[in-house]
Image (cartoon, grey):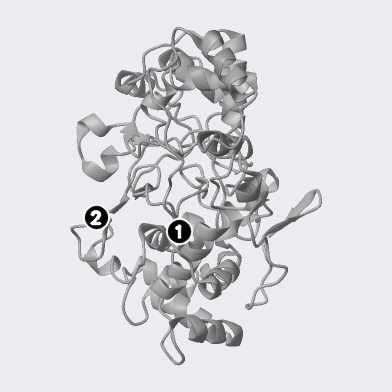
Amino acid sequence: MRLFYLLSALLLAMPVWGQQSLPGADAVFPNVDMQQVRLGRLLFYDPVLSGNRVVACATCHNPAFGTSDGVSLGLGDGGLGLGPDRRVDPENLPERRVARNAPALFNLGAGEFTRLFHDGRLEADPESASGIRTPMGAEMEQGFDSILAAQAMFPVLAADEMAGHYSENDVSKAVSRGLITGPDGAWDIIARRVGSIAEYRQRFDDVIGAGQPVRFTDIANAIAAFAAYEWRADNSPFDRYLRGEEDLAVPQLRGMGLFYGKAGCAACHSGQFQSDQKYHSIAMPQIGPGVAARFEDHHRDVGRMRVTGRGEDAYRFRTPSLRNLGATAPYGHDGAYATLEAVVRHHLDPITSLRDYDISQAILPELPGAVDDWVLVRPIEVEAIAKSNELAPVSLSDSEINDLLAFLASLDDPIGRKGRLGVPDIVPSGLKVPRKVGGSTSN
């Protein structure tokens, strides 16, 4: 039976099949301590880590929205609710949207994920004493078990995400004074909050040793252990196909032929989890506040260039993994496209798609005063993005696009998408857990 399916796919996909070889299903994941995983689960869903105690990791990375948040650009501190239902808190109005789309968390514990964030500002570095490299500096690289743990340092320090407006709480006051590590720094404040809660203190005793002081890095390491365990997603139909355990449907096999052949997807989306871990410009439309210092009067996002300072890296972003794609919309570093078909079609002719882009395709929670089309209405900005594009146009018929979408659906792992331990009903701080209940959400 498998030979029949394979021959059918070969005949239907020729002459483009075979330009890129299929990957192996051999991802390496870390061993985990389940006590640390269960501790990390509670911390991940607990708003106690945020400056104002209202935003948890799970607010923007929720399993109800594919470990993202279901919107193009989210609202962190100052928002109420979850996903597309999230709205501003009139008593604590956000200063701006989060500048980039919340990335999904699937398989980030796997060894091949050596770079994190859309611009790769956090990277594994075997030659560094800490094993990681980040613009945050060497002092902030010590004590993390992995780059997955180290990524936790960023959201808790960001005013728009978890820290809160400058100087409105003890964490944001510390951040505004440049106090991050050390006594009375932002990390120390968060760690003391957590360590003062009896249940957390007991659970940390079981993980790091009785009486050992709880450090922010201990919190981050527990959250990373949880994420690596909870959202491991390597048992999709495609993974089972690679292992010789089952066949894919004929449309999926045709789509696989296109993905690794004529469509050229695997040139960047390589490996078992479909990412070469490199940076590319595909002329993605820029919406929202962009990434800029507070004194900079623009809304552009130059991506990798902001990390390296090299002009050739302008508008390049890290190739995302394609796992559980159906659950992780919107798509792009800024969530410019609300549907999978729309972003696939963008890849086929990026420059035309950029120039024709309509911001109504995005999902943007209402935010008074937000300027979301600053780049789009400036031809010089749009043409700068177009000039950086690396993708040549590809012609696919509607039926071929449907086959490609069918293949992408074969990358879905329902267990990994849902998570293994699930959302807790309560957390030790007693604060509200960000969760979706029936058709409604709470935060």
Give the percent coordinates (x, y) of residue 91.
64, 60
- Residue 390 is labelled as none
Is 127 placed left or right of 395 in the picture?
Answer: left
Above or below for 136 versus 190:
above
Query: Of the residues under marks 2 and 1, which one precedes in the sequence?
Result: 2
Is 406 placed left or right of 149 in the picture?
Answer: right
Residue at image point 54% right, 75% down? 35
In terms of image quadrants, where is residue 412?
A: top right
Residue reaching furthest bottom?
Answer: 211
- Kind of residue sitting beneath label 2: Asp
Q: Which residue is nearer to you in this view: 11 or 394?
A: 11
The C terminus lies in quadrant: bottom right
Residue at image point 62% right, 53% down? 62
Q: Secondary structure at mark 2?
A: loop
- Mark 1 Cα shell of 10 Å, populated few (<14), some (14-19), many (≥20): some
Q: Which residue is nearer to you in this view: 311 or 294?
A: 311
Give the percent coordinates (x, y) of residue 88.
64, 51
Is 39 placed left or right of 159 in the picture?
Answer: right
In terms of image quadrants, where is residue 359?
A: top right
Q: CA distance from mark 2 to mark 1?
A: 21 Å
Q: Which residue is nearer to you in this view: 298 or 264?
A: 264
The N terminus lies in quadrant: top right
Q: Secondary structure at mark 1?
A: helix
- Mark 2 Cα shell of 10 Å, populated few (<14), some (14-19), many (≥20): some
The answer, for residue 9, to whether it is visible in the render is yes
**Pointer 2: what residue?**
125
- Kind of residue sitting beneath label 1: Pro
Give the percent coordinates (x, y) of residue 259.
48, 22
The answer, for residue 163, to whether it is visible in the render is no
Is 90 placed left or right of 75 in the picture?
Answer: right
**Pointer 1: what residue?**
155
